[in-house]
């Protein structure tokens, strides 16, 4: 299917064992973990246990956010639910020459996984982020998202732990 093909292409191009990015947050009031992501046709949320049934968490970053940052980011994530997945954005993020055609350049109307996670960080930290790369937010691939953590000192200082295998307990 389309998603498996683009996943394979993304992993090959980046040379990584992963091809997806998402935001995992804990709803302290309900005591559940939510996975917010753009995948399989739209931006949506699901329970972490259901996510883990079909996905392996390869890298995980823990951010220490203030209550205000967390609230701002969560509200933004909730307001994105139901927006379309950007198929053209995924292709252009993976196959760079397609960017020159403007494919998938759609602002916040449609998302790819790493673009959704990148925008969450921008909203939570209340500023534009440096990616260390040139181009549109619409073409933020998981590799650029990961590098964003390194290029923004306030986010880097908010990292509670380095890369870990998470939720194995």
Image (cartoon, rainbow, N blue to C red):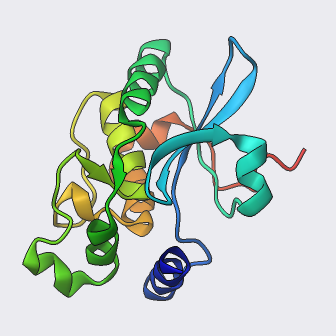
Residue 33 as seen in the image, left or right of residue 118: right
Q: Nearer the viewer, residue 42 or 52?
A: 42
- In the image, what residue occupies the spot 50% across and 84% down? 5
From the image, which quarter does the N terminus lie in?
Answer: bottom right
From the image, which quarter does the C terminus lie in?
Answer: top right
Q: Can you give x and y, in whole percent of width and height, for residue 69 in the image?
A: 42, 21
**Number of marks present in the image shown:** 0
Above-or-below relation of 79 to 113: above
Above-or-below relation of 78 to 57: above
- In the image, what residue occupies the spot 50% across and 42% down? 44
Residue 14 as seen in the image, left or right of residue 164: left
Q: Can you give x and y, in whole percent of width and height, for residue 88 in the image?
A: 27, 71
Residue 126 as seen in the image, left or right of residue 59: left
Q: Nearer the viewer, residue 18 or 9?
A: 9
Q: Can you give x and y, in whole percent of width and height, for residue 153 in the image?
A: 37, 42
Residue 81 as seen in the image, left or right of residue 95: right
- In the image, what residue occupies the spot 70% across and 32% down? 33
């Amino acid at each position: 299917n389309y998603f498996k093909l683009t996943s394979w292409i993304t992993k090959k191009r980046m040379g990584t064992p992963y091809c997806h990015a998402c935001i995992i947050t804990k709803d302290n009031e309900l005591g559940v973990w939510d996975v917010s992501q753009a995948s399989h046709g739209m931006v949506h949320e699901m329970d972490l246990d259901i996510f883990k049934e079909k996905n392996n968490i390869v890298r995980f970053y823990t951010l220490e956010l203030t209550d205000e940052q967390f609230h701002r980011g969560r509200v933004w994530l909730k307001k994105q639910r139901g927006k379309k997945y950007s198929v053209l954005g995924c292709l252009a993020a993976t196959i760079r020459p397609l960017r020159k055609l403007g494919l998938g350049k759609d602002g916040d109307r449609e998302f790819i996984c790493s673009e959704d996670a990148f925008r969450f960080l921008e909203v939570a930290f209340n500023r534009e982020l440096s990616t260390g790369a040139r181009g549109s937010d619409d073409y933020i691939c998981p590799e650029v998202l990961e590098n964003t953590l390194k290029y923004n000192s306030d986010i880097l200082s908010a990292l509670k732990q380095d890369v870990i295998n998470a939720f194995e307990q």
